Amino acid sequence: MNKLFKKFDVAVIGGGPAGILAAGQAAEQGAKVVLLEKNSALGKKLLLAGNGRCNITQIDHDARGFVEKIGKNGKFLFSAFSVFGPKEVVEFFEEKNLPTKVEKNGRVFPVSDDAIDVLSTLTKYLKDNGVEIITNAQVFGFEFAENKISGVKLKDQIILADKFILCTGGKAYPATGSTGDGYVWAEELGHTIVTPIPALAPVKIKEDWVGDLQGLSLEAANISLWQNEKKQASFQGEMLFTHFGLSGPMIIDASKTINLLLQTGSVTIELELFPEFTVSELDKKLVLAFEENNRKDIKNYFRELLSRKMLDLILKLTEIDPDKKLNFLTKKERYKIVALLKSLKFTVSEVMGFEQAMITSGGVALKEIDPKTMHSKIIENLYFAGEILDLDGPTGGYNLQICWSTGYVAGESAGRN
Ligand SMILES: Cc1cc2nc3c(=O)[nH]c(=O)nc-3n(C[C@H](O)[C@H](O)[C@H](O)COP(=O)(O)OP(=O)(O)OC[C@H]3O[C@@H](n4cnc5c(N)ncnc54)[C@H](O)[C@@H]3O)c2cc1C
């Protein structure tokens, strides 16, 4: 190998949102910084964020509310949030001439609705601060001696630096470059890796008939997750039916819990179409309604209450003739309808894997990282930021905020003298 050496104060590995913030912040402290990215351009995944609109952050909560949404590991973020939280992120972009807007549930987007503008703003920020950006720079590993890293190995050169910030992301959407390389190196360097699993992913369903509902979207659905005849969790929100199963924001948020439950047995998702009524209330309502509309056939009556696809499915599953008049409907048939309206059950086949998942749950164990600086407690001159850490949140701008906060703090501490 033809070894060429280049020396920096800080080398940042991975040019996603966390790496970009870390590199920019380190440079703002006066450090000579290099950002190494294996793709031909920075921020490939960032450009996909929010369906290309980029949900930059989430401002619906105070710090406590935000960390609660992250779950048991959320409290690790308190310190980084106090330095660079959602408010500071909005200010950061606004100061750099990227106006933002707030949409439903505190989701913040650029006014232009274009992730390219977010990436351009960040790239300019790096250039303005003199960060050397090297693309097509796949890192293969580290040079390491006496508990310190001295360099990163590229194909034909070694980058020497005093400090290193690892921001290679997780394993989700590997086509964007996030192939989990950082986990392997972190483990080799002595860090514990909490097993990475796909999170925020669509869910495959066993029942073939789910495909009949393909394209149907429910804006405010209620689902419960069941295992061993016990209700394990409930979720509310928007869901979408696909040819293979279930998707949409609520399902994607529930997928982490589903995946965890699948480790101990099979999981059933129960959809409740009329959550405002109990079974007996709904039955009574239908008795009255059927009496008032007794000349109507069942398909015409329910068309006002259910979407066409859902109605067709319910009639198919109950095996009731769609043309049957309401006054000919038996009690047993009515019960069958009520039972399905209150509890339409889907058996989970699997949560889609890393190829389809938006996020990786798991990663570098937080107990080995200083939450104030993102400094490794194991390796003297190593820092971490972003999705590589054992932190993940629901949809809504939480995950990018984790990257901005941890990236900022890691860069600021590594860049200081
Ligand atoms: C489809 C999709 C939509 C999303 N939408 C949103 C959203 O709207 N809001 C939100 O908050 N979150 C969203 N997320 C999640 C968010 O994009 C991620 O949390 C975020 O990108 C993680 O940033 P990161 O910098 O830690 O890692 P990444 O963005 O994964 O960046 C890591 C970088 O490291 C590089 N790299 C990896 N290995 C090497 C190596 N060996 N050598 C050199 N470079 C390497 C990769 O090429 C990559 O560019 C979305 C995710 C997906 C997949």
Image (spheres, rainbow, N blue to C red):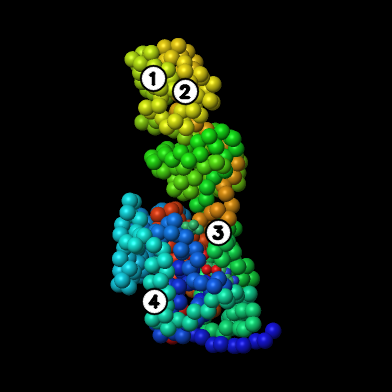
Mark sitting earlier along the chain (2/4): 4
Mark sitting earlier along the chain (1/4): 4
Residue 144 visible in the picture: no
Residue 153 lies, in percent from the top left, at 62, 79
Residue 382 in the image: above or below residue 364: below
Q: Which residue is mark 1?
A: 286
The N terminus - image quarter: bottom right
Mark sitting earlier along the chain (1/3): 3
Are there few (<14), some (14-19), or many (20+) residues within 10 Å of tag 2?
A: some
Q: Nearer the viewer, residue 388 or 40?
A: 40
In the rendered structure, are the residues bearing label 1 and label 2 in contact, judged by CB atoms less than 8 Å apart? Answer: yes
Mark sitting earlier along the chain (1/2): 1
| Three-letter code, disc 4 | Tyr
Q: Which residue is mark 4?
A: 125
Q: Residue at x 57, y 49 (%)?
A: 352
Residue 417 lies, in percent from the top left, at 43, 85
In the rendered structure, are the residues bearing label 1 and label 4 in contact, judged by CB atoms less than 8 Å apart? Answer: no
Are there few (<14), some (14-19), or many (20+) residues within 10 Å of tag 4?
A: many
Residue 58 in the image: above or below residue 91: above
Residue 98 visible in the picture: yes
| Three-letter code, disc 1 | Leu
Q: Nearer the viewer, residue 335 or 101?
A: 101
| Three-letter code, disc 3 | Tyr
| Three-letter code, disc 2 | Ile
Q: Which residue is mark 2?
A: 337
Q: Which residue is mark 3?
A: 173
Asked whether mark 2 lies closer than 8 Å to ligand 1, one says no
Cα distance between the residues tagged 2 and 4: 59 Å
Q: Please tell me in which quadrant of the rendered image residue 119 appears.
A: bottom left
